[in-house]
Image (cartoon, helix red, strand yellow):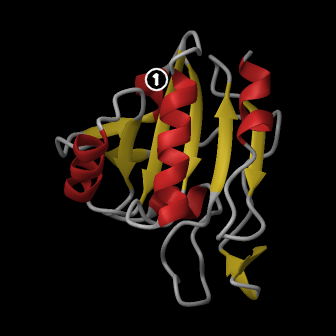
Amino acid sequence: MGHIKLGGIDIETIGTLPKVGDTAPDFNLTSEDLSSKKLSDYKGSRVVMNIFPSIDTNICATSVRKFNEKATGLKNTKVLCISRDLPFAQKRFVSDEEIDNVTNLSDFRDGSFGKNYGVEMTTGDLKGLHSRAVVVLDENAKVIYSQQVPEIGEEPDYLSALKPLL
């Protein structure tokens, strides 16, 4: 189990993020068109997973905007923004914001991504949602960076997350 904070209050997660050097677990997430996406769909590409509680909060929306901006200069890299939001909310957000360099994926169907990646919050007001985290993979789905953001109200460390991809 992992420990983070929400507004200074201790929150537990179901586990811990995959560590640098680990092979990332496969996943089955839902895209905006309701089709299923697996990690293997991104084989051969480097992957940035921007994981967060909800697209409808300021910090989560900011992280999507910033990763969208930074993704334009990354070669052979896919940025996946992953939450438990319904695909309809994700689609509305990217349409309203004119975001086109990231892919939003939802874990709304069964929550297995949150469990397998150790980011599902098991206590607190946001219990059941994902904590804020970033996991970066190489072309072979090996973890080359991971960050569990210690306070949900803080942004991830964008520079450190993207440094292994430069």
107 to 10, vertically: above or below:
above
Q: Is residue 8 toward the left or the right of residue 34 in the image?
A: right
Look at the numbered disc 1 and give the secondary structure of its residue: helix
Q: Is residue 3 visible?
A: yes
Identify which residue, 3 or 15, lies in the foreground: 3
Q: Quadrant of residue 76?
A: top right
Q: Amino acid at mark 1?
A: Tyr
Residue at 67% over, 34% down: 136
Residue 12: x percent and y percent?
71, 80
Residue at mark 1: 42
Q: Nearer the viewer, residue 136 or 9?
A: 9
Instruction: Answer with left or right where residue 23 lies relative to residue 27.
Output: right
Residue at 67% in and 42% down: 135
Question: Which quarter of the image is occupied by the N terminus?
Answer: bottom right
Q: Position of residue 121 (x, y in %)?
A: 59, 76
Few, some or many residues within 10 Å of mark 1 (<14, 14–19, 20+):
some
Residue 113 located left or right of residue 70? left
Q: Residue at x 56, y 45 (%)?
A: 50
Q: Nearer the viewer, residue 145 or 162?
A: 162
Residue 155 placement, left or right of 157? left
Looking at this view, is 115 or 145 the one in front? 145
Q: Identify whether 85 is placed above or below 106.
A: below
